[in-house]
Amino acid sequence: MVARAEVKYIRISPQKIRLVTNLLKGMPVQKAAAVLKSLNKKGAYYLGKILHSAVSNAKNKGFKEDTLFISRTIANPGPTLKRYQAASFGRAGVIRKRTSHVSVELDTEEKIINTVSSVKKRGRSLKSSI
């Protein structure tokens, strides 16, 4: 884990934002930003802002933007706001306005390259170590 950004209480269902987070896992940061700009989902807007924040955090730590990729994305449910709407026969129907807690973690590609090269130096193949 190199850099991390987390946003809480976003007014979008976790189910809807997970559609976008699952798409981005393992992508380089620059490619993910391009995909988010062209994606027609509400969650893409929020994830674009979170990704920008995570990249800024990584730059403050001294990492280069072109070596970063998305290692982990999590979209957990937050508290649900309950609202009521009038229904027939004097009843009230519940409307659930769901919220989400989303976090994005970035890592560097150099770390993965170094572990692969160290496994090859020891004389083992990559498949045997996995």
Image (cartoon, rainbow, N blue to C red):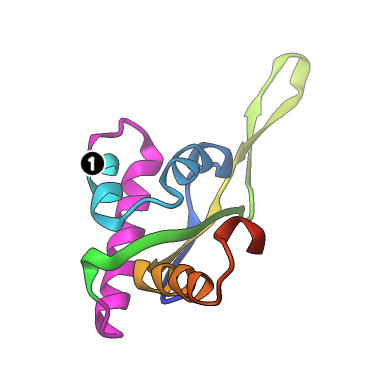
Front-lying residue, 88 or 20: 20
Query: Which corner quadrant of the image does residue 15 belong to?
Result: top right
- Indicate yes or no whether the magenta region holds residue 98: no
Dividing the image into 4 quarters, which one contains the C terminus? bottom right
Task: Kindly identify the amino acid type of the residue bearing the numbered disc 1.
Answer: Lys
Q: Position of residue 93 (x, y in %)?
A: 70, 27
Q: Position of residue 14 (x, y in %)?
A: 56, 44
Would you name the residue on which mark 1 appears? 37
Query: What is the crowding at mark 1: few (fewer than 14 residues within 10 Å), some, or many (at least 20)?
Result: few
Above or below, 23 relative to 100: above
Above or below, 60 relative to 109: below
Q: Is residue 80 left or right of residue 42?
A: right
Q: Main secondary structure of the magenta part?
A: helix
Residue extending furthest toward the front: 123
Q: Residue at x 53, y 72 (%)?
A: 119
Front-lying residue, 9 or 33: 33
Q: Position of residue 24 (x, y in %)?
A: 41, 46
Front-lying residue, 113 or 2: 113
Q: Position of residue 87 (x, y in %)?
A: 69, 19
Q: Residue at x 40, y 68 (%)?
A: 113
- Indicate yes or no whether the magenta region holds residue 48: yes
Front-lying residue, 114 or 127: 127
Q: Is residue 79 left or right of residue 46?
A: right
Q: Which residues are magenta?
A: 38-63
Is residue 11 visible in the rendered structure shown here?
yes
Above or below, 8 relative to 24: below
Q: Secondary structure at mark 1?
A: helix
Q: Is residue 20 left or right of residue 63?
A: right
Q: Residue at x 26, y 73 (%)?
A: 56
Is residue 53 visible in the rendered structure shown here?
no
